[in-house]
Image (cartoon, helix red, strand yellow):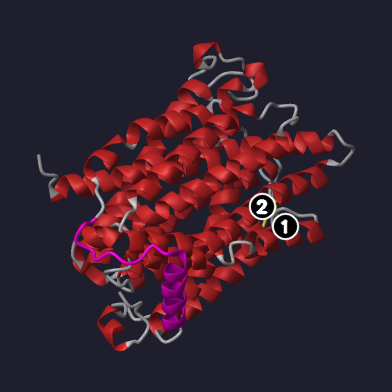
Amino acid sequence: MAITKKQRIWGWMSYDWAQQPFYTLGLTFIFGPYFAAVATSYFAGTGMDTAAADAQAQSLWSAGQTVSGIVIALTAPFLGAFADSSGRKIPWIAFFSVIYVITTWMLWGLTPDGSTLMWTLIIFYIGFIAAESGLNFVNAILPSLGTKEEVGRISGSGSAFGYWGGVVSLFIMLLLLAENDSGVTLLGIKPLFGLDPALREGTRSVGPFIAVWYMVSIIPFFLWVRDDRTVPRGSTNMGKVWGDLMATLRGVAKRKSMLNFLVGSMFYRDALNSLYAFGGVYAKLVLGWSIIQIGVFGIVGAITAAIVTWAGGLADSRFGPKPVIKASIWVLIVVSCFIIGMSRTQVFGFPIAETSHLPDIIFYICGAAIGGAGGSIYAASRTMMVRHTHPDRPAEAFGLFALTGKATAFLAPLGITVFTYLTGNVQLGFLPVILLFLAGLILLRWVDKDGDQASWDTVASSPSR
């Protein structure tokens, strides 16, 4: 039976549903804060005071993000160029899926005593590299799913569908598995399957849970999505692939709109990724939230993300992706200001009682804003990249998109690491994030809202076929 266009679109969107729990549960709301708590306890055990142990834990997490970002930046464009030349993306997605499943399952090994702290950090970010690399090839399929007008809605709907996956998976973890300091879940019961709360086995099960969720949810993708056999094939000789990639890179310099978009998005995506990566860590270290509180915060953010991203997709189809991106950046700048200016005892210098719930309420609002603006900016950026993509080289184009998204991926984590170390303050460590958002916003001024596909043929940068 022939695969219909509708099935292909739903299959493509199922990838977002399958992979989102890694970011929602792993990076931000369950495993990330748990890693921070274990790391803080471990460093405190070496004689550090609480503030120094918190800062060291955040620095270690950001170091892992920095190194993984560099690896992705160096490999993504070449892998994309090779995939375009061979005409095959699905085998690459399957390859990275295997690595993803193995590494996420192994996150179970982070015990509360911190004995496997460094090993688990390495494992987590290998999984992160696999997740991001696979996503590049999935994104490269997007241009073939519809017209320019349809792609914005498809991208937004796919992202929104993914966020709903994050919401559902987070609900399951909080209600049935992840325990609080009293050893019970949000339902007030012990973790299922006889998992031992004293060893934090309910929270540690997030790794195997992510792996199983992916294996089940990815089935529609591999059933209904196929490589486009109508795209002309090129040579898969490594030297030829490298030459084609270099020709494309030289051509980018002649394309003002694409160059400014790639560099601008490089800055604002780096800043956004840091908000995702450190949001839960911030809640743990600054506000003293439990894993359960952070999980509820995640649900609020994920539900907002699902709704606003879907609406952003409709706005993208009507007004184009550029206005959606600009509005989202401004929201994220305001959120970053609150993160820097707020602690448990003050808000922008105004003292509050340590028992006040005001910081909690503000941060819940910030979480909703991060979810909504972050989801919209991601989906709209995907659409804008499609408007700058050569129809015969989509994986290479999204490889460049990944390159620029990761080429300076070390900037925000490194900036956070340095500022946190120099100031000894977790909040002030977020200052570089605002600067990156502003840099991205400024460069968007020179990005054509319709992209530059029409001018491609006049640019002598397209690799010879």
Quadrant of the frame with the N terminus: top left
The verdict on residue 238 being magenta is yes
Q: Which residue is mark 2?
A: 62
Q: Which quadrant holds the C terminus? A: bottom left
- Tags 1 and 2 touching, CB below 8 Å: yes
Residue ID at (43%, 27%): 172
**Vertical relation: 188 (above or below) 415:** above
Asked whether, in this view, residue 255 is left or right of residue 337, the answer is left
Q: SS of the residue at dot 1? A: helix
Q: Amino acid at mark 1?
A: Thr
Q: CA distance from mark 1 to mark 2?
A: 7 Å
User: What residue is shown at x 83% (from left), y 37% (from top)?
Assistant: 44
Question: Residue 331: in sight, yes or no?
Answer: no
Q: Is residue 133 above or below residue 439?
A: above
Instruction: State the residue in front, 158 or 453.
Output: 453
Label the magenta part by its dominant secondary structure: helix
- Left or right relative to 294: residue 462: left
How busy is the neighbourhood of tag 1: few (under 14 within 10 Å), some, or many (20 plus)? Answer: many
**Magenta segment: does it hold 71?**
no
Residues in magenta, as a range? 228-252
Would you identify the image quadrant in which residue 84 lies? bottom left
Mark sitting earlier along the chain (1/2): 2
Q: Is residue 266 above or below residue 121?
A: below
Q: Is residue 109 visible?
A: yes
State the residue position of label 1. 417
